Image (tube, grey):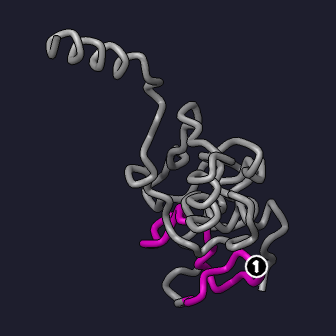
């Protein structure tokens, strides 16, 4: 009898959806995004009725509270089909982009320790998408983040 119960339990366990991910296993990030604590999940990794529907990586892993609460209540789910990665680019000896749009705009390169974090760390800019602490050494060294935020209208030249 025990053997049948174990087999039944095992078969039922295998029948559960594979996509169930405990909230503890998900890295929700932090709350440094622009729209934190607004009751809407702004992290593009999540989908569902509680998700903002953004296609911008600006708030990637930066709306932890909202996303965790909505995930736990079943109003968002982790969309495993979304692939998020650092952008690829071809660089020259000085690490400037070959892409003419980048060069013409003089956004520089991505040599900053804070490149690809969703905030512009370049003190030549101002606006909502700026990092809290700016240092001169990051001038021209956070091209991807600054260009993305500039293109969205979140920052402008200082």
Give the secondary structure at mark 1.
loop
Q: Nearer the viewer, residue 145 or 1?
A: 1
As drawn, which residue projects farthest toward the right? 153
Question: Residue 12 placed where, x, y %?
Answer: 37, 18
Above or below, comparing residue 22 to residue 140 in the picture = above
- In this view, 157 is above or below 44: below
Work out which residue is located at the far front of the displayed protein and give it: 1
Left/right placement of residue 108 relative to residue 115 reads right
For the residue pair 5 and 150, the one nearer the viewer reads as 5
Magenta segment, principal secondary structure? loop
Looking at the rendered image, the quarter that the N terminus falls into is top left
Residue 150 percent location from the top left of the image: 77, 67
Q: Give the x, y percent position of residue 40.
A: 74, 60
Residue at x-position 59% and y-position 37% = 79
122 relative to 128 in the view: left or right: left
Q: Is residue 79 magenta?
A: no
Relative to 1, is 153 above or below? below
Location of residue 104 by image quarter? bottom right
Return the residue at label 1: 128
Q: Nearer the viewer, residue 48 or 11?
A: 11
Dot 1 crowding, Cα within 10 Å, few <14, some 14–19, many 20+: few
Residue at the spot x=69%, y=58% of the render? Answer: 42
On-image quarter of the C terminus: bottom right
Residue 25 as seen in the image, left or right of residue 98: left
Query: Residue sitting at 62 percent across and 64 percent down?
Result: 145
- Magenta range is 109-134
Residue 139 drawn at (x, y percent)? 58, 81
């Amino acid at each position: 009898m025990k053997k049948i119960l174990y087999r039944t339990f095992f078969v039922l366990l295998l029948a559960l959806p594979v996509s169930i991910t405990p909230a503890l296993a998900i890295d929700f990030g932090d709350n440094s995004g622009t729209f934190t604590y607004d009751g809407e999940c702004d992290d593009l990794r999540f989908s569902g009725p509680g998700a903002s529907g953004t296609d911008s990586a600006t708030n990637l892993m930066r709306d932890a509270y909202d996303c965790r609460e909505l995930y736990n209540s079943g109003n968002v789910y982790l969309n495993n089909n979304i692939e998020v990665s650092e952008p690829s680019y071809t660089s020259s000896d000085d690490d400037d982009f070959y892409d003419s749009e980048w060069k013409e705009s003089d956004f520089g390169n991505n040599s900053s320790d804070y490149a690809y974090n969703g905030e512009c760390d370049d003190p030549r800019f101002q606006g909502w998408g700026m990092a809290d602490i700016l240092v001169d050494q990051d001038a021209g060294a956070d091209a991807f983040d600054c260009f993305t935020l500039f293109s969205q209208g979140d920052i402008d030249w200082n």
